[in-house]
Amino acid sequence: MALLYFTKVIAPSVWGWLADNKIDRVKVVQLGTFLSLASFSLVFLSHSLILLACMMFLFSFFWNAILPQLEAITLSALQENPDRYSKIRLWGSIGFIAATMGGGYYLDRFGIHYLPTLCFCGAGLLAACTFGLKIKGRTLEARARKVDRFRQYFKCREVWCFILVCFFMQLSFGPYYSFMYILIEGK
């Protein structure tokens, strides 16, 4: 479980840097979804703790690349209509609730041993959906110029304090969720 939260601290920055400097955001999302799907497929071969840990590290490193880039693509697409963002988030939340309830019902009915297959199929559908993504807006060169201006903010002490606070906040979720899971499973 700690590997999930470790990669959540480092992966978005690594993939964000790639999207800002090297490859297009849509390509980052496509690459992240396909690499997370490929690495998750190792769960079907995992018969040892070491292999399972490697699979979890790879999967979560690629998986944590996806959401921040999808948010950036969505905000870029809504430049003229930023008020539509809340509706998109609303339907995302409704979809999450429906998937969670439907998945829970399915697992209760048919058994937990189908969970890896269910996750794999969901990740596969997500990977397939990335082909429909389009991005409009700045080119990589224009983004690189904006990144140079953005780097000026990192000379401020307050920005570093904020980043440090966010880092520790993200870091704190790992033990919280892990121990909460152990507590719930133990009852």
Image: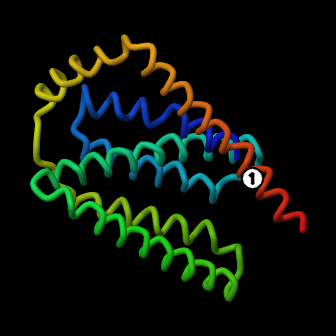
**Residue at position x 15%, y 30% in the image:** 140
Q: Residue furthest front?
A: 158
Above/below status of 186 relative to 58: below
Q: Which of 165/12 is in front?
A: 165
Q: How is the image coloured?
A: rainbow
**Residue at position x 25%, y 26% in the image:** 21
What amino acid type is highlighted by mark number 1?
His
Q: Is residue 117 left or right of residue 50?
A: left
Above/below status of 91 relative to 141: below
Element type where label 1 sits in the image: loop
Q: Is residue 107 left or right of residue 133?
A: right
Q: Which of 42/173 is in front?
A: 173
Q: Is residue 20 left or right of residue 112?
A: left
Dot 1 corresponds to which residue? 47
Q: How many marks?
A: 1
Which quadrant holds the C terminus? bottom right
Q: Is residue 36 left or right of residue 136?
A: right
**Residue at position x 18%, y 23% in the image:** 144
**Residue at position x 73%, y 48% in the image:** 176
* Disc 1 residue crowd, few under 14, some 14–19, many 20+, Cα 10 Å: few
Above/below status of 6 relative to 112: above
Q: Residue furthest top?
A: 155
Q: Which of 41/78 is in front?
A: 78
Please provide percent x and percent y for residue 28. Answer: 31, 42
Please provide percent x and percent y for residue 4. Answer: 62, 44
Above/below status of 97 relative to 109: above
Q: Residue furthest right?
A: 187
Q: Which of 104/49 is in front?
A: 104
